[in-house]
Structures are given as structure tokens and as C-alpha cells.
Image (cartoon, rainbow, N blue to C red):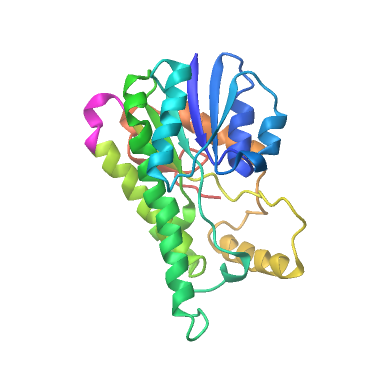
Amino acid sequence: MTSYVVTGGSRGLGLEYVKQLSEDPKNVVFGLVRNKKRATRLFDLNRQNVHIIEADIVDPEGLQIAAKEVSNVTGGKLDVLINNAAYVLEAERVGLTLSTYPEGKFDVLEKDLKESFNVNVIGVIHTINAFLPLLRAGRAKKVMSLSSGLGDYDFTLKDSFAIHSPYSISKAALNMVVVKYAAELAGEGFVFLAVSPGFVNTQETEPTPKEIESFKGILKKFQVVYPSFEGPTTPESSVRMTLDVLNKSTVDDSGAFLSHYGNKEWL
């Protein structure tokens, strides 16, 4: 039996991780969600090896309770933690740069930066710390945190990608979090990875005309560095590829920041 915890398991990539991992009946998969009532598609999987636990990654006490629930099922162990839950900006602010937030709306910029950091960085730290005792007792000792190529300095400069700043900044900080854990626990057989899932279409509704125009602009930007890039991949493909990266990783890879291809090719 291999045990997995997936944060943000109610939709998007998180739901797809739970779906693919639970296809093997020998796996036991825990989907962490903020609100069980809204996790209808997770319940619809109706699989005996899927356990749904309500916990918010910015609530350390709630995470401790969640870890106890996992421990009760697994006998005090956890093999793999997948930090998928993240905060993404409201669509209307994705196209803003740090200097183009509306004049006088400094509180909006500050809110976006704080919320991005609180969820994408501090929340991940709380989650790792809550499950660390179980991971220490597990066999695999693997922690994969979903990052983004937008957190890569070189790609940002080559692409002149100045928008989506709070998210990008938080993901760059997350990469250092992964390195810090890798350095701290290097002698215990852990594998800590920051993995970009690529550019994935997780949208659940039809895009608005404004969102379509924004996407076209982002696509054109990406094609500066990746001329052959044609558009986003599917959650199914992204999850399959990132799980392959995770499964192939060893202690020698701990602390690495990789793409879904297992290298630095972000798209």
C-alpha cells in the first residue's frame, strides 16, 4: 500500500491527482479540501481507497487534525505529500504588472501579494510540517510541491513576462522553501521537489471574450521563448507527466525545480 495526501483535491489538478492515483486499488489517497460540501466531484469518484478530509492549508490547527485522520487510517504513516492547493489572482488582475495596479489602489496590490504568499508559501510550509511526522515513518518520503515556470528568473527575463506578478513571486519563494527542506532533511532519505505542471487548462466554464484576449496575449509572450508552443495541455496529461517525474525521482534530485518534462523546459 502506498499512501498519498493531495491538497486542493476538489477540482482541477488536485481532483485529477486523486483520480489517477486512486485507479490503483493498492493506493490509499486522501484528498484535502476546504469545503466538503463543494467537493461533489470528489465524492462522485465513489472509490473505497479515497478519503476526503476537510482542511484549509492556511489553518495549522486544522492541518494537525487532518494529519491525525490520515494517521488513523494508515497506522501513523504517509508515503507521499502533493502540495497542489494554491491561490491564483482574480482574472481581471492577472494582466497587471507591479507598477500598473490602479492608481490609489495600493491596498489591492498589497492584498494580492499577501494572499499569494500566505497560501502559496506559508500554507505549504504549514502543510509539510503537519504531515512531516507521518512522512518520516513512511517508505517513500516524497513531497512534491506544484510550482510554476513563471517563478523561474531566466524564463521571466527572456520572455519579458512582467504580468501575473504576485503569483510568480510566491512561486519563486516556494522554490526556496523546497530547497530549505531538502537541505534540512538531506540525511533522512527525503525527496523534496518543486514541479511545474506546465500551462494547463483547468477552467471549468466558458472563457469570456476578455479572458480569450488575455490568453492570446500570454500565448504570444510564451512563443517568444517557445516558438512551437500551441496552447495549454489537459489536466490528465499534466498529472500523468508530473507523477512520472515524481516516481522517477531519487534522493539525488531533492531540492530540484523541474518541469513536467523532468527538466527546465516549462512549456
Residues drawn in magenta:
184-190
Between 201 and 32, the one nearer to me in the picture: 32
Residue 62's image quarter? top left
Counting from the top left corner in percent of width and height, residue 49 is at 60, 19
Counting from the top left corner in percent of width and height, residue 215 is at 66, 63
Q: Is residue 125 magenta?
A: no
Residue 61 position (above or below residue 139): below
Which residue shows up at 50% across the image and 80% down it?
A: 100
Counting from the top left corner in percent of width and height, residue 74 is at 45, 17
Does residue 144 appear to the left or right of 51 in the view shown?
left
Residue 254's image quarter? top left
Residue 253 position (above or below residue 151): above
Which residue shows up at 33% across the image and 37% down it?
A: 129
Residue 104 visible in the displayed image: yes
Does residue 209 appear to the left or right of 255 in the view shown?
right
Residue 98 visible in the displayed image: no
Q: Is residue 189 magenta?
A: yes
Residue 39 position (above or below residue 160): above
Between 142 and 78, the one nearer to me in the picture: 78
Between 26 and 54, the one nearer to me in the picture: 54
Residue 171's image quarter? bottom left
Which residue shows up at 69% across the image and 66% down it?
A: 211
Counting from the top left corner in percent of width and height, residue 59 is at 42, 46
Which residue shows up at 48% across the image and 70% down it?
A: 162
